[in-house]
């Protein structure tokens, strides 16, 4: 649970969320992230450090470049946590469907 809280807290910051959304398409260098998001390099590096510290992204070195990608295990953990709410949504959607069926039958 602690990892989920850390993940959600980190993603609550808009620039970090934008970085994660960009990395969803695949690993990118810091320079590419800077160019695509129009943020300064020091700001991107600061956000990548936060994301790395909570294991949302991982980093590999390619010569002088640092390549960042998403850490799949962190998102799997988040997915498992979200699944615990599935029955809540299923129940609500079932009640909505029943209401719509009743409304259609009376029309």
Image: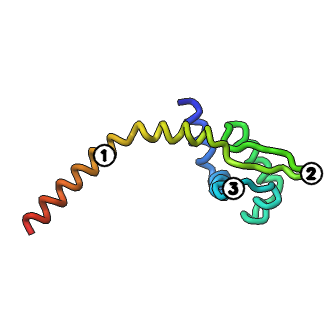
From the viewer's perspective, tell me whether residue 37 is left or right of residue 87: right
Q: Earlier in the sequence, mark 2 or mark 1?
A: 2
Residue 24 location, quadrant? bottom right
Q: Quadrant of residue 85?
A: top left
In the rendered image, which quarter is residue 99 located in? bottom left
Relative image position of residue 28 (x, y in whole percent): 76, 56
What sort of colour scheme is used for the picture?
Answer: rainbow
- The numbered disc on residue 26 is 3
Total marks shown come to 3
Separation (CA) of disc 2 from disc 1 = 49 Å
Q: Earlier in the sequence, mark 3 or mark 1?
A: 3
Mark 3: which secondary structure?
loop
Q: CA distance from mark 3 to mark 1?
A: 32 Å
Which residue is located at x 67 percent, y 51 percent?
16
Residue at image point 63% right, 50% down? 13
64 versus 88 height, above or below? below
Q: How far apart in space, not on screen, are marks 2 and 3 (Cα)?
A: 19 Å
Among numbered discs 2 and 3, the one appearing first in the sequence? 3
- Which quadrant is home to the C terminus? bottom left
| Element on which disc 2 rests | loop
């Amino acid at each position: 649970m602690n990892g989920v809280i850390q993940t959600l807290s980190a993603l609550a910051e808009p620039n970090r969320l934008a970085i994660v959304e960009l990395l969803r398409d695949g690993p990118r260098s810091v320079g590419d992230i800077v160019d695509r998001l129009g943020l300064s390099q020091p700001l991107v590096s600061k956000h990548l450090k936060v994301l790395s510290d909570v294991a949302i992204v991982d980093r590999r070195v390619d010569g002088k470049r640092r390549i960042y990608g998403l850490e799949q295990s962190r998102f799997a953990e988040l997915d498992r946590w979200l699944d615990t709410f599935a029955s809540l949504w299923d129940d609500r959607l079932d009640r909505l469907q029943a209401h719509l069926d009743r409304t259609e039958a009376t029309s």
